[in-house]
């Protein structure tokens, strides 16, 4: 885990952060970076074993991390997760809505209903409920930060990723809606829009040489990002350095949306 000194405005010392989809990829990178900056991090995803591996590594590096499995499409599990946070931490300062589903890659006209429903359930309904559950607690405690992982696909729908792109566009709208209504409670709500990133989630793209070449031609920097290159945007938005920033969509995409 990265160790940093003198983080100043980027310090998250003592803050409690919940990161969903934290067993790998961008979520894991964010959790590690938050812990390196002093946050008490709760890692969540469906796989307790994978979460625990990351949490143990963070703790062995001197960070504070706890693994709690939760399916982002299961309302009962989400409620139970927040009840545990209430009991064990007594507050929540940061929510990173990062868990996502993309079960179908193909023409939009052939999208199976089950794939559509699952993608909406996790990427939109799950994000909304997580934001509500966190936001109610943040309102009561006097403030907090919610950061949604959206996507450049929410701005420019990608071929073969129709329903995924649609849900990410909805996440952008949801971010603005929560930001406007929650600002009075000192709750800041922003979105990060990653571009193509080397993760298992994006392997359908990065493992296809012909498709990858086509996509890289659209990225001015000419390469995919590493998760550790996306995570600093989440750190900035969670920190006091972003105290007057709410309702934004921050692309981290190598220039793709330029």
Image: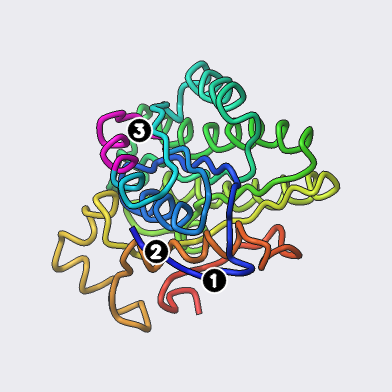
Q: Marks 2 and 3, Cα distance to the nearest angstrom?
A: 40 Å
Q: Nearer the viewer, mark 1 or mark 3?
A: 1
Indicate whether 78 appears above or below 57: above
Q: Are marks 1 and 2 in contact (CB under 8 Å)?
A: no
* Residue matched to label 1: 6
| Residue under the point 38% across and 68% down | 229
- Please provide percent x and percent y for residue 100: 41, 41
Q: Marks 1 and 2, Cα distance to the nearest angstrom?
A: 10 Å
Q: Secondary structure at mark 3?
A: helix
User: Taking 258 as reference, is 176 left or right?
Assistant: right
- Range shown magenta: 44-56
* Residue matched to label 3: 115
Q: Marks 1 and 3, Cα distance to the nearest angstrom?
A: 46 Å
| Magenta run includes residue 48 | yes
Q: Are marks 1 and 3 in contact (CB under 8 Å)?
A: no
Q: Nearer the viewer, mark 2 or mark 3?
A: 2
* Residue matched to label 2: 3
> Which image quarter is the N terminus in?
bottom left
Query: Image quarter for residue 114?
Result: top left
């Amino acid at each position: 885990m990265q160790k940093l000194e003198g983080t100043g405005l980027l310090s998250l010392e003592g803050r409690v952060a919940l990161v969903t989809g934290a067993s790998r990829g961008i979520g894991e990178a964010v959790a590690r970076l938050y812990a390196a900056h002093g946050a008490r991090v709760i890692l969540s995803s469906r796989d307790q074993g994978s979460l625990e591996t990351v949490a143990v590594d963070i703790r062995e590096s001197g960070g504070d991390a706890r693994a709690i499995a939760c399916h982002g499409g299961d309302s009962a599990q989400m409620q139970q997760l927040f009840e545990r946070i209430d009991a064990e931490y007594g507050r929540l300062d940061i929510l990173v809505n990062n868990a996502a589903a993309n079960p179908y890659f193909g023409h939009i006209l052939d999208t199976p209903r089950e794939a559509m429903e699952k993608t909406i359930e996790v990427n939109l309904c799950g994000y909304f409920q997580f934001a509500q559950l966190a936001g109610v607690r943040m309102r009561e405690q006097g403030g907090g930060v919610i950061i949604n992982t959206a996507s450049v696909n929410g701005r420019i729908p990608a071929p073969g990723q129709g329903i995924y792109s649609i849900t990410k566009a909805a996440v952008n709208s949801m971010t603005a809606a929560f930001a406007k209504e929650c600002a009075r409670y000192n709750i800041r709500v922003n979105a990060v829009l990653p571009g193509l990133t080397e993760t298992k989630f994006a392997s359908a793209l990065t493992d296809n040489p012909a498709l990858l070449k086509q996509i890289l031609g659209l990225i001015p920097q000419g390469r995919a990002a590493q998760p550790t290159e996306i995570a600093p945007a989440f750190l900035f938005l969670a920190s006091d350095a972003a105290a007057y920033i709410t309702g934004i969509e921050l692309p981290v995409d190598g220039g793709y949306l330029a």
